Image: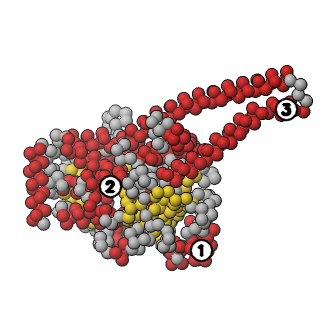
Amino acid sequence: APRAAGRRAMLGIVGSLLGLVAAPSSTVIVGAGPAGLATAISLARRGWKNVQVIDRLPPPPALDDTETWGDTARFYLIGIGGRGSGALRSIGAWDAVESYTQPVVGRKDWAPGAGVDGGVQTIRTDRPPTNVIARDRLVACLLKLATEELGVQVRHEVDVTGIRWDGEHSAVLQCRDCSAACQSEPAEPPGADATAPNAAEEDSGECFELSASLLVASDGARRTIAEAIEAEDARRRWALPGTRFRIRKYRDTSVRVYKTVPFTPPADWRCDINYSARTKAANFDALPALGGSYCGVLLVKPDDQLTLGLKDVPAARAYFDELLPMFSPLITDASLAGVIDKPTSRLPLFRYATPRAHHRHSTVLLGDAIHSVKPYFGLGANAALEDVVALNTALDAAPSLGAALTAYSRARATEARVLVQISRSFDYSGIRSFFTFIGPLILDGMFHAALPRLFAPNTLAMLQKPELTFESIRWRKRRDRMLQLCLITAILAAVGTAVAAAAAATVRMITRATLPPAARPLAMAVPFAAAAAGAVLVRRRIGSDVADVMAATGAPGKGAEGEAKVGLAGRAAS
């Protein structure tokens, strides 16, 4: 402890000499999830001393409690991609996390209709592996680093019930001890919409206030601070259009629920890849944990048989034998009993904070507090960790705390909006899904393969590149769409001209030649038959392109009705 205190004092002196933002008198971070603890670590490494983190939930199990962590189905697995690992490296936290992760280098996927032996394995060599870890274990890693090595104070089972701002430079939190209430709350996956506490909970526990010169809102789906900012802005008498803070919420047009299903793969299966199966009724996606066990997530419609209830283990066995015959033998009866007893969980809604990610000169928001997405493509948690780096960068460059928060907001508010809008475009159902998801994947696969220097890879592949911002990805794909539209129009015009010329030549041949009357209709049909044959070839090519894209990028499959059916665990975030 004395050595850590000495390091923090030295960092503070160096920061002052370099002209960095002076440490505020007190910093309070609401939310002890990955983003909140990562923020505490980055601020402590700047030499800031009075950094406090509060969270309404109990602390995670001990980091090295292998027996507890071995119960894979208890915990929500997330994948840390290049964006997340790069962010953790930049704040000096990756070494504390990496040894507790399971690298994933590829995927084996069973397409709809594939038999037990019909899985297609893809090993990715063009990108670093994704590191899978239980979300709570990631929290435990960061908690240990923050408290034991950097001296950050973390208080669990403390709920924020209200907030007020005293001027531009101070925020006051109304808090209460919620030990009993929090202990009894069911665990929810990160990003899931939290429910407000009931009256009995509000009346329980000791109440107190915390004052902060810098308040960091990383309270996830609860969004207590974000909603307070929205309410305060709504009370403003005068405001320019588009300047009031608000939380933009999307209606869920593709409702899915899920249950977790643990299993242990046989000895001849690889333990460093995802396993997934796409069917007309559901999707199953499994991620590995340390020790060789897997946790699968079964994503289904709310009216599915699994959701409505399976009466006993034999009924559950019959359900999995029919739906997932390649995985059913690997699921024990005890696991099936757990699946029956466990209630279904719902995915979070798409929402983002706009038009800024800060309030006054004292409050900043990050993570799920400003962007909430369904965990399909590993963007939630990774983007939240990038928010931490963006705040750190703003503090490095700005002359004051207020200027730093404004710079951070300018950098991340747009990113939050674009991230949610891109993710939302993948989630439509029906014919709209083809135009916003499958169609663009097909076009990108074909054009990038033919002209890689002119056309970028598909959006899913670009989202995994940490050097690209979400906004730059959107603008690049818009440019690609315009070029693709121009080329497609030119090709269709050329093909139409060729077909018309062939038909005209056929007519002239028929009128000039002495063909039997019965042969003339056949001759007229030749150009149209050639066009139909070309359409069939294109359709087959499109189908293979979709399959190739799905396998290469880990994208979700599409059912017969065009509805997104994605394995939650394989793209976890938040």
Q: Position of residue 476 (x, y in %)?
A: 43, 36
Q: CA distance from mark 1 to mark 3?
A: 58 Å
> Up-down: is 59 above or below 332?
above
Q: Are marks 3 and 2 in contact (CB under 8 Å)?
A: no
Using the rendered view, name the quadrant where residue 105 is placed. Answer: bottom left
Residue type of the residue flagged with mark 1 = Arg
Taking the image as shown, residue 490 lies to the left or right of residue 344, namely right
Q: Are marks 1 and 3 in contact (CB under 8 Å)?
A: no
Q: Position of residue 461 (x, y in %)?
A: 45, 47
- Residue 11 or 340: which is nearer the viewer? 11
Q: Residues within 10 Å of mark 1 (few under 14, many from 20)?
A: many
Q: Secondary structure at mark 2?
A: helix
Residue type of the residue flagged with mark 3 = Pro
Q: Nearer the viewer, mark 1 or mark 3?
A: 3
Residue positioned 62% across, 73% down in the render? 318
Q: Nearer the viewer, mark 1 or mark 2?
A: 2
- Residue 24 or 320: which is nearer the viewer? 320
Q: Residues within 10 Å of mark 2 (few under 14, many from 20)?
A: many
| Marked residue nearer the N-terminal end (3 or 2) | 2
Q: Position of residue 341 (x, y in %)?
A: 51, 74
Image quarter in which the N terminus is found: bottom left
| Marked residue nearer the N-terminal end (1 or 3) | 1
> Label 3, on which residue?
521
Q: Secondary structure at mark 1?
A: helix
> Label 1, on which residue?
317
Residue positioned 36% across, 77% down in the render? 67
| Marked residue nearer the N-terminal end (1 or 2) | 2
Q: Which mark is residue 85?
A: 2
